[in-house]
Amino acid sequence: MAIDLGGKQGRVRPVMNVTPLVDVVLVLLIIFMVVTPLMMKKLTVHLPETVKTDTPPPVDQTQLLLRVEADGRIFANATEIPLAQLDATLARMVAARADRTVFVDAADGAKYGLAVRVMDAARGAGASTVGILTEKAK
């Protein structure tokens, strides 16, 4: 803070000196500009390669597809699995597979918690890869 000795009546008036404030703000700006790129996290996403063809590829019947319906029913390929037996049934089905890949398809009206429970059960059953279908399974 500085002092102004002039004025109409010759009284002392306090005047704000903003130069140190600007210096501090510029130093903080430079620090944040240097630190921000170092704080960025790297998230790796493996996307499948797209093949442009006129005909869709044939459906592989050996894949394990878990479907969660809007009414809460769970299907493994075409077999309905009760929620109480989900863990044991998935453990048996995944153990019989060589690739240990499970795909999960949730209906639009399916509850989020149930879909996550099915994915957790697939991972707990020993699935090495849990894929989420983004388009309607045929």
Image (cartoon, grey):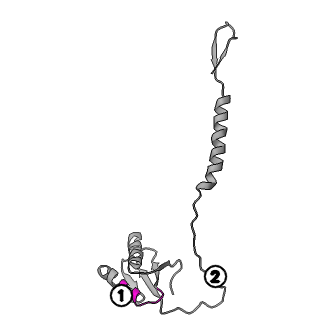
Magenta residues (range): 90-99
Find residue 24 and report its horizontal and vertical position in percent.
64, 35
Q: Quick check: 110 above or below 77?
A: above
**52 on left or right of 60:** right
Q: Amino acid at mark 2?
A: Thr
Marked residue nearer the N-terminal end (2 or 1)? 2
Name the residue nearer the viewer: 12 or 30.
30
- Specify the label residue 3 is tagged with: none
Bin the neighbour count of mark 1 within 10 Å (Cα to Cα): few under 14, some 14-19, many 20 and up. few
Q: Residue furthest left?
A: 84
Residue drawn at x 48%, y 87% is 99
Which image quarter: residue 119? bottom left
Residue drawn at x 63%, y 41% is 28
Residue underneath mark 2: 50
Q: Quick check: 2 above or below 120?
A: above
Find residue 45 and report its horizontal and vertical position in percent.
57, 72
Q: Secondary structure at mark 2?
A: loop
In magenta segment, residue 88:
no
Residue underneath mark 1: 92
Prevailing secondary structure class for the magenta stretch in the rendered image: helix
> How far is the residue under mark 2 from the one under mark 1?
32 Å
Bin the neighbour count of mark 2 within 10 Å (Cα to Cα): few under 14, some 14-19, many 20 and up. few
